[in-house]
Image (spheres, grey):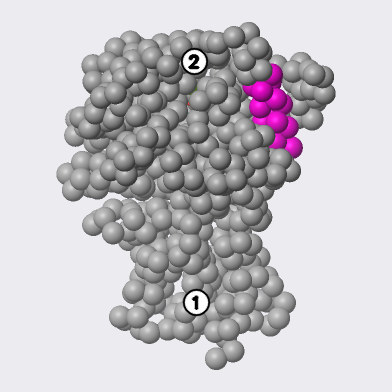
Amino acid sequence: MNQEKKQDLQEKAREVRIETLKSIGHLGVGHVGGAMSIVEVLTYLYYAEMNVNPQEPRMNDRDRLVLSKGHAGPALYSILAMKGFFPKEWLLTLNQGGTNLPSHCDRNRTPGIDMTTGSLGQGLSAAVGIALATRLNKTDNRVFAIIGDGESQEGQNWEAAMSAAQFKLGRLIAFTDYNKMQIDGMTEDIMDLAALENKWESFGWHAQRIDGHDFEALAEAVKRAKEETDRPSMIVLDTIKGKGCSFAENKLGSHNMPVSADDLKEALAALGEGEN
Amino acid sequence: MKKLDTYADMRAVYADTLIEIAKDDDKVVVMDADLMAANGTKGFKDAYPDRMINAGVAEANMVGVAAGLASQGFIPFASTFGCFAARRAYDQFFLSANYAKQNVKLVGSDPGVTAQFNGGTHMPFCDITLMRVIPNLVVLDPCDTVSLHKLTKAIYEYKGPVYMRLHRKGATTIYKDDQEFEIGKGVVIKDGTDVTLIANGLVMVTEAIKAEKALAAEGISAAVIDMHTIKPLDEALVAEYAKKTGAIVTCENGQKIGGLGGAVSEYLSENMPTLMKRVAVDDVFGEVGTQDYLQERFGLTSEKIVEAAKSLVKK
Ligand SMILES: Cc1ncc(C[n+]2csc(CCOP(=O)(O)OP(=O)(O)O)c2C)c(N)n1
Ligand SMILES: [Mg+2]
């Protein structure tokens, strides 16, 4: 990846953080930590990888994304708004009665959302189904999925893992947002996922592990994953919960946190809001 | 325990009650699925770290493990959001706990509209209905700090599986400290002669009490019953008030199909057909919003109860 492209993506990521914090801050509470930790992977997918069309959100041969850790929806909503799937003003309606942007992803409400999620552990199965449909339809799109590390404790993920390998779903590329934290503590202390890449590998997946905030590493890993044609790929992302948000970064309490006007001001200033 | 009317959150009443019970019984264990902080069971962990079992984000496993613990004489109180307690761990609770007759207490928090900003994926409108069809299961929805405290103790004493709803954030105290509670026995909060409001849970007992006052102002005398146990239903009390007032309005923070209103109407229609209305969620999914917005949206308000009561009394 050239420097220019990299800087461009970094700038986009900064914008995604700003928009996301504004939308959560407007409501005053939300899933800051898990939204911030996936900003780079989402930015990479939507600005460097996926074939999607804001004018035609349900375009037949588009690439799909299942954000299985649906509580991080606000980060995805920011990108979808930035790309023009819906007006940016929607971002300030997050979670308000009647909104099209509910806390957890909802495919029937939000243009650009491919699957409804929020009950952890269900998204990867849906992604397997979408990937099977892709094969049956003979379209050549890809299916991406993002799951949480805490979420990985749900047994259904491992049923999905086995089935994706059995069905040889080379077009499925999943990411684990390994931010090491869940609600009640460090993942390691609650229900350890140790040797996570090995787990996926032993389930028949191609597995990699990279710095999830590094665009070059993301590009390299996705390129490598695409070379796999008859087994699914898992890219484990080492990330930091709350990344880039001054009051949330690396804090356990960032999972679902109140955001005061002062917090928001401070975080936006630190992100250089209004500067270019 | 602090004085019950001083609690700010119901979840703290739940946790402190478990701590009180666990002091005299080392077979009591508490479980959660990465929602200790949300459900207040973190308080129990601080008191009895060795008897707090966090299953991680894995509700089905948690309930299966609870059944195994129960089979060895332990008394597990396992909690998670009501949507996941009822739906993600249903078969484990149905078979490993209930069919196998194991003493598992399953606690589902954030009932109905109180899930607020967590929205449709997290809004348990269906838990009571699902739980009611499990043979012999005890199903509860306490409405205030005193009843939550006493019913938590009662389900500990009771040998067998139980599903209890837990209103976790915010608290209200309706009863005096010396009010007695028994599983399967409703409480008459206010007597009346024209119509009976049968409610449960914090949200709808609160609305029913408001509705009773509004009805009184219009010269209608409404009885208010807290039917904290949906199963086994206090049929004798239902029959008594059906006879006395001739009109029943049920009020619940959940689906109309198969819930409290379902239970009351099933009983009455076979035994003593009585005019009835059910104020409940009418066959739709949940969504995001504030609790006020959601109560309006799904018709779970005192105004709707008043309207229902008046439509019956008129007849
Ligand atoms: C089935 C299910 N159980 C519980 C929850 C409540 N919950 C929401 S997020 C979360 C923790 C998830 O941890 P992780 O996947 O690590 O999320 P992240 O750190 O990326 O925010 C829990 C328990 C849920 N949404 N779904
Ligand atoms: Mg995490």
Q: Position of residue A165 (x, y in %)?
A: 24, 27
Query: Is residue A26 inside the magenta stretch?
Result: yes
Mark 1 Cα within 10 Å, few/some/many (few <14, many 20+)? many
Q: Position of residue A41 (x, y in %)?
A: 53, 22
Image quadrant in which you'd find residue A145: top left
Mark 2 falls within which chain? A
Of labels 1 and 2, the one closer to you? 2
Instruction: Give the secondary structure at mark 2.
Output: helix
Q: Which residue is mark 1?
A: B277
Res. B167 visible in picture: no
At label 2, which amino acid type do we have? Ala
Mark 2 Cα within 10 Å, few/some/many (few <14, many 20+)? some
Mark 1 falls within which chain? B
Report the front residue among B254 and A43. Answer: A43
Q: Quadrant of the C terminus of chain A?
A: top right
Q: Position of residue A214 (x, y in %)?
A: 55, 11
Q: Which residue is mark 2?
A: A219
Report the front residue among B206 and A239. Answer: A239
What residue range appears in magenta?
A: A10-28
Image quadrant in which you'd find residue A47: top right
Q: Is residue B175 left or right of residue B106?
A: right
B13 up-or-down from A37: above or below: below
**Prevailing secondary structure class for the magenta stretch in the rendered image:** helix
